[in-house]
Image: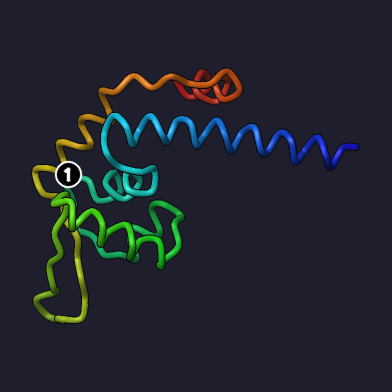
Amino acid sequence: MENIKSISVMKNVMFAVKGMERQLIDACGVSLKEVLALFAIGDSRITASDIVQCTGLRSSHVSKVTGHLEELGYLERHFGSEDKRKVYFSLKRKGLDCIERVRSHNFEVPGLLRPLFDENE
């Protein structure tokens, strides 16, 4: 019975997080993975490997996320001056504005997740 309860709790947590991500998408137009990448880059100029390290996302996800953010006009790629194979990312004004929208948005936190948010305030 314990395993079934664990699965049920994981499902409920997943739905709660997905609901918050839906709020993020509706309010700011970006997914959780995209926001993680934007915050990782911030006002720096970093590589995809740095984004992987900062976010915990897989390399394949970072590649998709940075590609989509570039299409949206939120970030730009720069090639290394010494090693042209090295690619760096930095945020454009639109990306910085998105970060500010996320920071100022009042998310409705589901009751299940409320203790996590209260703990980190």
Q: Nearer the viewer, residue 90 or 112?
A: 112
The image quadrant of residue 20 is top left
Image coordinates for residue 58, horizontal then vertical, percent: 45, 62
Residue most extreme to the right: 1
- Horizontally, residue 49 falls left or right of residue 94, namely right
Mark 1 = which residue?
Answer: 95
Residue 30 position (above or below residue 16): below
* Percent coordinates x, y for residue 9 in the rendering: 71, 33
Looking at the rendered structure, the secondary structure element under dot 1 is: helix
Where residue 68 sits, quadrant-wise, is bottom left
Q: Nearer the viewer, residue 112 or 87?
A: 112
Residue 10: percent from the left, percent from the top? 68, 38
Quadrant of the snapshot with the N terminus? top right
Of residues 30 and 103, the one nearer the viewer is 30
Q: State left or right for residue 120 relative to residue 30.
A: right
Looking at the image, which residue is at 33% across and 65% down?
Answer: 63
Q: How is the image coloured?
A: rainbow
Q: Residue placed at 18% from the left, 57% from the top?
A: 71
The amino acid beneath tag 1 is Gly
Residue 44, position in %: x, y?
Answer: 18, 52
Q: Quadrant of the C terminus?
A: top left
